[in-house]
Amino acid sequence: MQQRAPGLAVIGSEYQALDEIPQRARVFGLWDQAALWFGAASLPAAWLYGAIMAGWTGLGGALLLILGISPLVLVPWAFLGYIAARTGGASVAILRPAFGLRGSVLPSIFYLIFGFGWAAVNVFVGSIGTSFIFKGIFGTPALGEPGYQGPMALSILVTCAVQGFFAVAGHRAIRVMAMAATIGLALLGGYETYLAIRTWGVADLFAWHPPQTLTTTVGPFSYAITLALLLDLVVAYNWTWEFIGDFSRFARTPQAGTAGPWIGANVAQTWWFFVGALGVVFLAVQTGQFDPSRSDPNSVATGLGFGWGAYLVILVATVATNAGNIYASALGMSQLAPRSGLSIRSLLAIAAVVVVPLSLFPLVVGNLLGSYIFFLDFVGALVVPLWTIVLVDFFLVRRGSYSPELFRLEGGAYWYSNGIHWPGVISLFAGTAVYWIVAFGFPELRSTVTATIPTVIVAGGLHLLTARRTATSTN
């Protein structure tokens, strides 16, 4: 029998969403997983979120979120990797016992929203650098300058074309790009940190505070940057790394599939969140103007006098990171249509095309910061109840055990009522409704208790109470 190659060579065209990974292909050790996730989490969008953190109370408040809250929020997310490593199932596969073989189609649609949404956000942020490159070559306006919309749209199309090519080309090219981008971003972020501290000193940078509460709007929705909102957003940011299961299913041990992603993602995000916060504070102290909407790494690099090298590094990082989002979206589509007969490569091409119109959305809205916050808040209403239910189902309802029958297309232990597990589906709807009601209907309540905490209590508690009877008959 042909042996499969080690490392990232087991990923790509060989396994689809509902394939159980055989033991011989589970070759990722703890540090393999950590390195993979350090690269995946080293993305330009993290800088932008770090700048939003600084909009609360400056660098001190940002560090509270970065060093205290974010690592804790990543713990339950990492245990999704444990489930995937135990079962050998992708993220969309480990949903199936909680929602049923057919009922899992609904959360699989959510999964697509996460993948496509993050890919679109990253494309827009990465394309800002491309617009500055076009400005240098053709003299066209870059983002923020009068008439930037046309050149920015072209920049987005170029970025989408490049990332689509590499996503379909395969994992080996992506791996080389990810390594190069991670090194380049580390050098860029390190120099920015050195420049900021050398110019102003630690005391002056930490003494700076926003002159007023940061607010932004998108459509009818208005946001004021508070600790509760930032907690909701950091949960949404961390938990929408939805493809953790897609990689942890290749882990050599459950411990590697759990601790590896936590270490890699946490180290990367701690660094990049801080670089984003430091960059926008540095520019605020330097210029006297605080503008988080211009705190993406391209705009910061421009403000600090960096050139094309910085823009190319950010573009490569965007393409490398989005390959994972496109891969996750392709797996999500294969779960929705398991009998389609389409290869994973064909699904990758379709996913790459779908990202294009979504990436143009911030141009229509005209507010990058508001669009980014609204996106995180929107997916938070989906991801918080979704993963809460999966964690409660595996660890509390099923007591840490899923049957291989979760890979079946129909029938078996997880068929329930015509393929739908109503306790999971109802709990998901209830949790999503609670999040949106608290977030948009009672903003004062949200500013004190967050929208996440009530959602976890309702979705997790309801599923725990209602799913025990069916669990007894399937275990």
Image: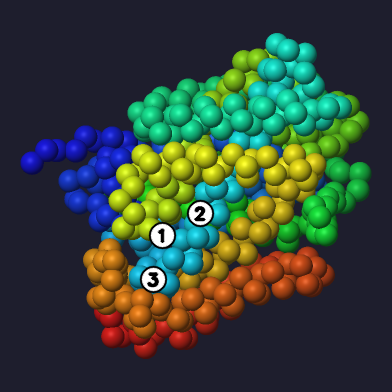
For this view, does 465 lie left or right of residue 382? left
Q: Position of residue 70 (x, y in %)?
A: 59, 52
Q: For the view shown, which residue lies furthest in the bottom direction?
A: 469
Regarding mark 1 in the picture, which secondary structure is present there?
helix
Kindly indicate whether the residue at mark 2 contacts the one at mark 1 (C-beta within 8 angstroms): yes
Residue in the foreground of this view, choosing between 77 and 204 = 77
Distance of label 1 from label 2 (alpha carbons)? 10 Å
Name the residue located 82 percent from the left edge and 30 percent from the top edge.
144
* Residue 453 visible in this rendered orientation of the protein: no
In what quadrant of the picture does the N terminus appear? top left
- Identify the image's colour scheme: rainbow, by chain, secondary structure or one colour: rainbow
Distance of label 2 from label 3 (alpha carbons)? 16 Å
Amino acid type assigned to the residue bearing label 1 in the image: Leu
Distance of label 3 from label 1 (alpha carbons)? 9 Å
Residue in the foreground of this view, choosing between 80 and 332 = 332
Q: Which residue is mark 1?
A: 336
For this view, does 191 lie left or right of residue 144? left
Label 1 vs label 2, nearer the camera:
1
Amino acid type assigned to the residue bearing label 2 in the image: Leu
Amino acid type assigned to the residue bearing label 3 in the image: Arg
For the residue carrying disc 3, how many other residues have a C-alpha within 10 Å: few (<14), some (14-19), or many (20+)? many
For the residue carrying disc 1, how many other residues have a C-alpha within 10 Å: few (<14), some (14-19), or many (20+)? some
Regarding mark 2 in the picture, which secondary structure is present there?
helix
Regarding mark 3 in the picture, which secondary structure is present there?
loop
Q: Which residue is mark 3?
A: 102
For this view, does 269 lie left or right of residue 23? right
